[in-house]
């Protein structure tokens, strides 16, 4: 007898309308999987900080039936039985009952099933194999998922070995659920997961990446990430972290920093793990580039996390001059706030309250400098390349070099970012350069110093 009280469920109105319409057309409509799991986890008070669950449906209606029944649908995965039903600004996935026909650990060939019992028997873990039918209030829990949730246990449905052979991604999903809910992994399930780790290498990078992103969005990713390490999963997709994981203290510190970073800042959390992978900016950047490329992150995310890892150190301090703060801002660009978040996370995991106070003081001064809107890049200079060409310079790299010298002067003294001042300084520097060229010894010129070879 399950302890679930359906009367305490509070699905959104759009879900209820969708279920009611399916039932009115003569079909069964069940809430299943993550929505029931998360709702019951909250009921028993084991994870009160969870966000509201996504309420999706499974049904005996075929995809064509669903698309005919609802006016606004999106056929997101019709071949696998899934249709998204739109209700106002909300959407609900409606999936036909399924049963596995053939699996290879990476892809499954499924057939539509006729009963909710068949559908539940193919689920991965007992906590995900609970279903509720809103029309009748009936709860189906043949695999004891509610009791396992109450006891804080992660258990595979049926034959644990078979469940993981069907889809090796379930190993990573198991790490995530055990970590998220702080569940103990049932002994046979744990053994089967460890034995199945070798199959992870056959998964697609995209599926592994999405699992990692879900872990990083959890309130406390460290528990799942530690299971990655202790169960041997790092070597298959995360070899850059093997050395770090081998150093117990460094690994715990890195995981603590991940937890301390803002949950909504996924890139900062990724960077907080990778900055400990090497002692040098080049090594950190290489580790980030390698790992994120392997997992096929977007070019934008890959480049940004790599930048954070490379720019993590050297950092700026509260006692540095305003010019040094501007110089640091110019070097890190739009990454400055995330770099502070990264350093705050490292300080928090170490419990260094004095370091946090110093960081806060530094951040305040840097923010004040940034809000003054100083010129920090060539685009912000009052003079441009065309202005230097008008002074008689020839197009080429020397124009950029002179602009960069002017920018350095402006970073040192923002009041110098005036057109006439910079133009006069440019004239002076050009004149100095011309005199230096004219005064070079003739023997140096004859030796070819600064001149192209005859064969060039």
Image: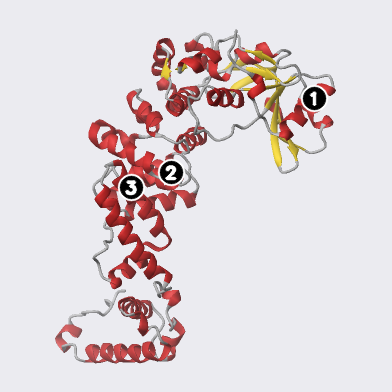
Tell me the CA gap for discs 2 and 1: 44 Å
Near-viewer residue (326 or 318): 318
State which tag comes first along the sequence, 2 or 1.
1
Label 3 or label 1, whichever lies nearer to me, is 1
> Residue sitting at 46 percent across and 15 percent down?
151
User: In the rendered view, does 314 fall on the left or right side of 385?
Assistant: left
Q: Is residue 165 visible?
A: no
Instruction: Report the residue marked by disc 3.
Output: 286
Instruction: Report the residue marked by disc 2.
Output: 293
Q: How many marks?
A: 3
Figure quadrant of the C terminus: bottom left
Residue 205 coordinates in the image, percent (x, y): 48, 35
State which tag comes first along the sequence, 3 or 1.
1
Q: Quadrant of residue 118?
A: top right
Name above or below for residue 281 compared with residue 198: below
Instruction: Report the residue marked by disc 1.
Output: 22
Residue 112 coordinates in the image, percent (x, y): 71, 18
What secondary structure is marked by label 1?
A: helix
What secondary structure is marked by label 3?
A: helix
């Amino acid at each position: 007898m399950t302890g679930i009280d359906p009367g305490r469920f509070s699905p959104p109105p759009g879900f209820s309308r969708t279920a009611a319409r399916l039932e009115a057309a003569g079909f069964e409509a069940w809430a299943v999987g993550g929505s029931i799991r998360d709702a019951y986890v909250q009921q028993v008070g084991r994870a009160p900080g969870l966000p509201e669950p996504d309420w999706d449906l499974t049904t005996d209606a075929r995809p064509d039936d669903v698309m005919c029944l609802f006016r606004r649908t999106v056929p997101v995965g019709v071949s696998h039985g899934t249709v998204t039903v739109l209700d106002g600004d909300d959407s609900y996935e409606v999936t036909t009952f399924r049963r596995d026909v053939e699996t290879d650990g990476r892809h499954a060939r499924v057939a539509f099933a006729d009963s909710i019992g068949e559908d539940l028997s193919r689920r991965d873990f007992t906590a995900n194999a609970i279903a509720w039918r809103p029309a009748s209030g009936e709860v189906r829990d043949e695999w004891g998922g509610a009791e396992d949730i109450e006891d804080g246990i992660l258990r595979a449905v049926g034959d644990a070995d078979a469940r993981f052979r069907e889809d090796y991604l379930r190993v990573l999903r198991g790490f995530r659920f055990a970590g998220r809910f702080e569940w103990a992994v049932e002994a046979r399930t744990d053994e089967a997961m460890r034995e199945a780790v070798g199959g992870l290498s056959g998964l697609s990078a995209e599926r592994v990446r999405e699992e990692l992103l879900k872990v990083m969005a959890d309130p406390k990713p460290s528990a799942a990430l530690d299971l990655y390490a202790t169960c041997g999963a790092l070597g298959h997709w995360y070899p850059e972290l093997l050395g770090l994981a081998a150093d117990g203290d460094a690994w715990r510190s890195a995981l603590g920093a991940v937890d301390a970073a803002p949950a909504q800042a996924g890139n900062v959390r990724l960077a907080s793990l990778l900055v400990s992978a090497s002692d040098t900016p080049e090594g950190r950047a290489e580790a980030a580039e390698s790992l994120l490329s392997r997992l096929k992150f977007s070019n934008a995310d890959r480049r940004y996390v790599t930048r954070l890892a490379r720019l993590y150190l050297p950092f700026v301090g509260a006692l540095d001059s305003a010019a040094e703060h501007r110089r640091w801002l110019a070097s890190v660009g739009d990454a400055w706030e995330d770099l502070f978040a990264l350093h705050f996370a490292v300080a928090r995991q170490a419990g260094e309250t004095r370091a946090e106070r110093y960081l806060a003081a530094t951040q305040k001064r840097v923010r004040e400098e940034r809000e003054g809107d100083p010129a920090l890049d060539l685009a912000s200079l009052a003079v441009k390349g065309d202005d230097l060409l008008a002074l008689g310079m020839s197009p080429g790299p020397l124009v950029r070099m002179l602009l960069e010298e002017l920018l350095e002067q402006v970073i040192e003294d923002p009041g110098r970012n005036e057109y006439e001042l910079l133009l006069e300084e440019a004239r002076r520097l050009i004149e100095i350069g011309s005199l230096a060229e004219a005064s070079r010894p003739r023997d140096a010129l004859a030796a070819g110093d600064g001149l192209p070879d005859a064969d060039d």
